[in-house]
Image (cartoon, rainbow, N blue to C red):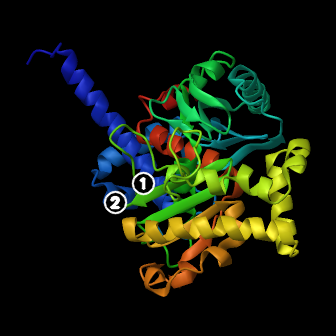
């Protein structure tokens, strides 16, 4: 029989092989390590195929024998495999008002680099901020290179709306409208084999909090969650059936621009009465008499001071927080009936006021519940802290790389 010269046959064969390699990697990642027979059972792959695929992945240092091997029966050796990829890094950089965060994980999800830097973000000056982020990413790359670790991808995270993976449609707290931030940073850093990517902070933070909760006892079955944060602006995410909810244009849930005051104040988005006009962090700080403090020390420090003063019973700060919580409770009350989440997670400075935000009507609270977290207990503080969004971004990128190791170039870096 003549050998086929049809390039489509080769393409299909290559795609199937890449899919199977990715299937092995993602299965090992999900199980936290497994023997070849277990992986074959989970994936449906033939054992002969499993033997060949695992050999390729071991040679490429994407898998390794588990450090702790179980005791096998006499005469048999059952080798467990686990994710390796310690020589490869997924890098993320998160921008907030007056703060920059850089994080890098290896392909097994282990932390390689972590930096939090207090900065002053010039309002409206995207070029200056791109330079700042590029400098911090470059410092991270130098650290990784010194340890013989190859950076594969870079994810940029901003507090705004991103619809095309290239442009910040708007980030009102930064004074940005239509800023091509991905290209601004990409032009200032070395090329990454799997590219430079851009996303909005709230949905990525929501995803990170969702995965953190699912790792906790009794919550593995969590599928529907609502995330609300207030730090740089007000953001949120809705997760339904384990996936982030998106709109027809790729835009994501924006709670800061839900109208809560009909015919209220004009918002920077051009509409009247948005939640941001009465409960944005900048508004709350102003009402708490902390505007000068915020100007001197930056937004993160000012929010910490707000929490401190409110907890100490300082009258003006307590009144400002009480007023803000009233609007946030209104949002949560309506959100529960709109989306029926099992759990609500509060991020940013709202994580410090879970008790206040749990004071919802009993008929509303009865809709909430997963595992042993029910009613008011189903309203939880965020787990991931300030790094939540960038953690979510590089976790999703890591899973994408593992699912297609050949196409993403992982096999070429040994």
Q: Which of 222 and 147 is in front in this view?
A: 222
Q: Disc 1 designates what residue?
A: 27
Q: Quadrant of the C terminus?
A: top right
Q: Which of 301 and 334 is in front in this view?
A: 334
Q: Kindly identify the residue that appears in the image at 57 percent across and 70 percent down.
A: 329
Question: Residue 6 location, x and y as percent?
Answer: 17, 15
Q: Kindly identify the residue that appears in the image at 78 percent across and 58 percent down.
A: 287
Q: Which of 248 and 288 is in front in this view?
A: 288
Question: Residue 253 location, x and y as percent?
Answer: 46, 50
Q: In which quarter of the image is the N terminus?
A: top left
Question: Residue 310 location, x and y as percent?
Answer: 82, 70
Name above or below for residue 34 compared with residue 249: below
Q: Nearer the viewer, residue 382 or 141?
A: 382
Q: In which quarter of the image is residue 335?
A: bottom left
Name above or below for residue 267 compared with residue 226: above
For this orientation, the residue located farthest to the front is: 263
Q: Is residue 154 left or right of residue 258?
A: right
Name above or below for residue 145 compared with residue 92: above
* C-alpha distance separating marks 2 and 1: 7 Å
Secondary element type, mark 2: helix
Question: Residue 268 location, x and y as percent?
Answer: 59, 39
- Whether residue 73 is visible: no
- Whether residue 48 is visible: yes
For this orientation, the residue located farthest to the left is: 1
Q: Disc 2 designates what residue?
A: 42
Q: Is residue 75 left or right of residue 282?
A: left
Graded by Cα atoms within 10 Å as few (under 14), some (14 to 19) or many (20 or more), the crowding at tag 2 reads some
Contact? badges 2 and 1 (CB < 8 Å): yes
């Amino acid at each position: 029989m003549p050998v086929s010269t049809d390039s489509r046959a080769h393409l299909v064969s290559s795609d199937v092989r890449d899919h199977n390699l990715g299937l092995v990697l993602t299965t090992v990642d999900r199980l936290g390590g497994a023997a070849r027979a277990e992986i074959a059972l989970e994936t449906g792959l033939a054992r002969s195929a499993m033997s060949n695929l695992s050999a390729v992945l071991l040679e490429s240092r994407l898998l390794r024998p588990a450090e702790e091997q179980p005791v096998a029966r006499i005469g048999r050796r059952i080798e467990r495999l686990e994710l390796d990829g310690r020589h490869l890094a997924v890098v993320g950089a998160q921008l907030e008002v007056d703060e920059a965060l850089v994080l890098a994980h290896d392909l097994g999800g282990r932390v390689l680099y972590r930096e939090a830097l207090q900065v002053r973000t010039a309002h409206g000056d995207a070029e200056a901020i791109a330079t700042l982020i590029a400098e911090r990413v470059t410092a991270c790359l130098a650290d990784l290179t010194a340890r013989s670790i190859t950076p594969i991808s870079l994810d940029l995270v901003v507090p705004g709306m991103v619809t095309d993976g290239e442009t910040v449609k708007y980030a009102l707290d930064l004074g940005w409208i239509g800023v091509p931030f991905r290209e601004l940073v990409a032009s200032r850093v070395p090329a990454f084999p799997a590219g430079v990517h851009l996303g909005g902070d709230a949905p990525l933070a929501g995803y990170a909090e969702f995965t953190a909760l699912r790792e906790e006892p009794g919550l593995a079955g969590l599928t529907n969650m609502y995330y609300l944060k207030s730090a740089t602006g007000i953001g949120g995410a809705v997760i339904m059936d384990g996936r982030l909810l998106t709109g027809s244009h790729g835009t994501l849930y924006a709670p800061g621009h839900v109208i809560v005051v009909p015919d209220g104040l004009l918002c920077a988005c051009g509409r009247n009465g948005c939640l941001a006009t009465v409960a944005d962090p900048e508004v709350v700080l102003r009402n708490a008499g902390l505007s000068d403090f915020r100007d001197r020390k930056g937004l993160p420090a000012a929010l910490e001071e707000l929490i401190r003063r409110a907890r100490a019973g300082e009258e003006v700060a307590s009144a400002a927080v009480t007023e803000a919580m009233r609007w946030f409770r209104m949002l949560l009350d309506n959100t529960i009936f709109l989306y029926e989440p099992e759990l609500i997670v509060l991020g940013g400075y709202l994580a410090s006021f879970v008790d206040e935000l749990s004071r919802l009507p009993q008929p509303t609270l009865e809709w909430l519940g997963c595992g042993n977290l029910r009613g008011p207990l189903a309203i939880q503080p965020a787990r991931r802290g300030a790094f939540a969004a960038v953690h979510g971004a590089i976790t999703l990128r890591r899973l994408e790389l593992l699912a297609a190791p050949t196409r993403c170039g992982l096999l070429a870096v040994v």
